[in-house]
Image (cartoon, rainbow, N blue to C red):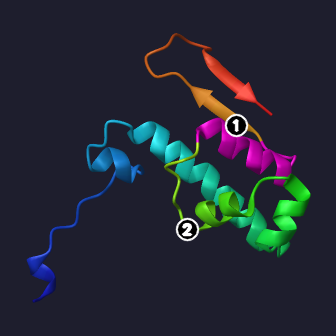
């Protein structure tokens, strides 16, 4: 095989959308929040055990997040986990097709 055997296609930035998943936006949002949870754990050098003691979330929850098994999580539960680890977060939600100024902001 050589480089001419492949076609390079630029993605949208949302792999779930690129593959036609009907819940693409939700899954992408959950993945972004889970990624931030993992980054906070790494940046602060927190073990699962230490994260459990700081947040009161179950060790199994952190294990699932770290292995990207997000099926059992709602977006708000992931956001609560992140908030328990890192109080300095800001989440912005924009409603597609909405009028001007229809942005919800949660801190």
Q: Of all residues shown, which one is farthest toward the top?
A: 99
x and y, in percent, of residue 105 in the image: 72, 27
The residue segment tinted magenta is 74-89
The quadrant holding residue 46 is bottom right
Q: Quadrant of the C terminus?
A: top right
Marked residue nearer the N-terminal end (2 or 1): 2
Q: Where is residue 44 in the image (x, y as percent from the top left)?
A: 84, 70
Instruction: Specify the farthest residue to the bottom.
Output: 1
Is the residue 80 above or below the residue 104 in the image? below
Q: Tell me if residue 107 comes above or below residue 15 in the rendering.
A: above
Residue 50 shows up from this direction: yes
Quadrant assignment, res 39: bottom right
Is disc 1 placed on a helix, strand or loop? strand
- Residue 89 location in percent, x, y? 79, 44
Q: Does the magenta stretch include residue 86?
A: yes
Q: Which mark is residue 67?
A: 2
């Amino acid at each position: 095989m050589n480089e001419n055997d492949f076609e390079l296609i630029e993605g949208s930035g949302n792999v779930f959308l690129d593959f036609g998943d009907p819940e693409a936006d939700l899954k992408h949002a959950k993945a972004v929040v889970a990624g931030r949870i993992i980054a906070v754990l790494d940046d602060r050098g927190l073990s699962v055990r230490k994260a459990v003691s700081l947040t009161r979330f179950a060790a199994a929850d952190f294990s699932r997040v770290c292995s990207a098994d997000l099926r059992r999580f709602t977006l708000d539960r992931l956001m609560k986990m992140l908030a328990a680890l890192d109080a300095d977060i800001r989440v912005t939600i924009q409603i597609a097709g909405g009028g001007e100024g229809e942005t919800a902001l949660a801190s």
